[in-house]
Image (tube, grey):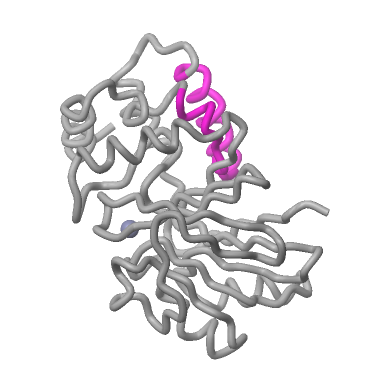
Amino acid sequence: MALEIVAVPVLSDNYVWLAHDPASGETVVVDPAVAAPVLDAVAVRGWRITQIWNTHWHADHVGGNADIRQATGCAIVGPAGEADRIPLIDRAVGDGDIVRLGAIEAMVMDVPGHTAGHVAYHLSSEAVLFSGDTLFAMGCGRLFEGTAAQMFANMARFAALADQTRVYCAHEYTQSNGRFALAVEPDNVDLVARMVAVDAARGRGEATVPTTIALERATNPFMRAATVDELAARRAAKDMFRG
Ligand SMILES: [Zn+2]
């Protein structure tokens, strides 16, 4: 049986991801901003949380750590570069480390820029990437603690993953990202088509994630930036963009 992945929408636009491995019965929570809706979501499914994986230290990614640990006794995995800011961390991980959900392996990728120690979790056997606030649908994270050169390198690494890889990012920013992307590349036919679908989905109140690496390669202006300078200029323009 395949890994089951469920979104728990919380706060204004966060997605907390639950990944359940039926073979082992393990369930991991990725970036629990809060605890209560996450605990409710596992309870209705009869699942048991065994792990938390954090991508970075921001409160809307770790805010539920303590209460979920209290309720479940789960193990907490987070970025080594930010271990002192991850509540109740048990295992600090960095690039190339392997974390396991049952028999499923996730490789840790260091993807700094949004924060200095940000990590992503790549489950290659499942073609799944948990990208936190580094790669979004048609966007990338703001550069709070890192550089455009770092983000450019991150985008190149993500672009090299398999086409069909499903990307589970931590926010529903797709519509505003897409408006910016269209301002950058108004003649990109894949982008124009994608935004028609995104606007329709949002109109129905539906989530627009996960996305895929293939879709991002075709439509994400940060992944499509040809140089560090181009990515830097686009990131600066997006910070000011009111679309
Ligand atoms: Zn963040």
Quadrant where the N terminus sits is bottom right
Residue drawn at point x = 53 percent, y = 43 percent: 167
Residue 200 in which image quadrant: top right
Residue drawn at point x = 41 percent, y = 33 percent: 138
> Residue farthest to the front?
96
Check the image and report above or below for 92 versus 126: below
Residue drawn at point x = 23 percent, y = 24 percent: 227
Check the image and report above or below for 235 versus 183: below
Count of marks placed on residues: 0
Dominant secondary structure, magenta: helix
Spot occupied by residue 214 in the image (x, y as percentages of width and height): 54, 27
Quarter of the image where ligand 1 sits = bottom left
Check the image and report above or below for 43 versus 122: below
Q: Any magenta on residue 202?
A: yes
Instruction: Locate residue 42 relative to residue 52 in the image: left or right.
Output: right
Residue drawn at point x = 61 percent, y = 45 percent: 124
Spot occupied by residue 25 in the image (x, y as percentages of width and height): 77, 71
Instruction: Locate residue 156 relative to residue 24 in the image: left or right.
Output: left
Spot occupied by residue 139 in the image (x, y as percentages of width and height): 36, 37
Residue range in magenta is 191-217
**Which of these two is toward me, 7 or 241?**
7
Quadrant where the C terminus sits is top left
Spot occupied by residue 163 in the image (x, y as percentages of width and height): 57, 29
Q: Any magenta on residue 83?
A: no
